[in-house]
Each structure stands twice: as C-alpha cells, then as structure tokens.
Image (spheres, helix red, strand yellow):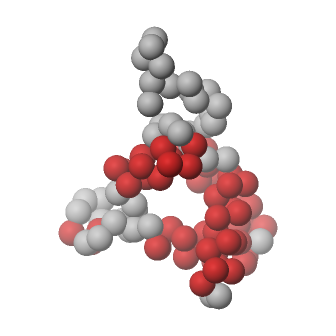
Amino acid sequence: MADIAGESPWAGRYPGSWPGLVVRLALRAAIRPWLALDLLAAVWAFRRRHWYRIPPFLPLPDHEYIRWRMYTAYGDENAVPPAEDVIRFARWRRALLRL
C-alpha cells in the first residue's frame, strides 16, 4: 500500500528490525520462563511446512506469510511489530487454546 510518492503511509511508524525484536523478546523470556514457553509455542505454530527440507533447516515461518500478517495487522508488509504486541499475541494464543 503506497501513496502517490510511492512510500507507505505507515513507513517509520513501527521502527525496528527483526533481529532487534528477537533480542528484546529473548531478554524478556529469560526473565519470565512462562513467556519463553508461550513465545516458543507461537513460533512453532507459525513454522513453514516441510521446514526440514529447506535450508537453513530451521522451523521458521514463510517470508510471504509474515509479510501478509504484517500487512493485515499494521497496514504495511514491512512493519516490525513492537515486542509488546508479540507478547500479547503469545499470551492470547495460550489462553485461547488453553495450553
């Protein structure tokens, strides 16, 4: 979604990087073990099908799927969610599934 100038109207609204988000979440999970379990369960649920056949052989989500999720959540497929949103989602998922 771009304006006339070609830049997303959401550009800069959700600053950050994916590695930075992972570090922030890992630090919070180190302090709260239950949060670590919630985050790991969420990551496992988002893994790509047949991840063990595709290098780097890690259970990571598909890039196109994540871009679609960011677009539907934030209106920008390049958005990086705030750590609080990811934590809220992981806790909501656990409560919804009664894990």
In the shown orientation, is residue 93 left or right of residue 8?
right
In the shown orientation, is residue 77 left or right of residue 38?
left
Picture coordinates of residue 70 (x, y %)?
A: 50, 47
Picture coordinates of residue 8 (x, y %)?
A: 50, 25
| Residue 19 visible at all | no
Q: Which quadrant of the figure has residue 2? A: top left
Picture quarter with the C terminus: bottom right
Residue at horizontal 78 percent and vertical 67 percent from the top: 31
Farthest-out residue, top: 5
- How many tags in the picture? 0
In the shown orientation, is residue 65 left or right of residue 83?
left
Picture coordinates of residue 77 (x, y %)?
A: 46, 40
Residue at horizontal 46 percent and vertical 11 percent from the top: 5
Farthest-out residue, left: 53
Picture coordinates of residue 54 (x, y %)?
A: 23, 63
Residue at horizontal 69 percent and vertical 62 percent from the top: 87
In the shown orientation, is residue 87 left or right of residue 74?
right
Classify 82 as above or below 31: above
Picture quarter with the N terminus: top left
Classify 27 as above or below 68: below
Farthest-out residue, front: 4
In the foreground, 48 or 9: 9
Classify 16 as above or below 65: above
In the foreground, 47 or 69: 69
| Residue 2 visible at all | yes
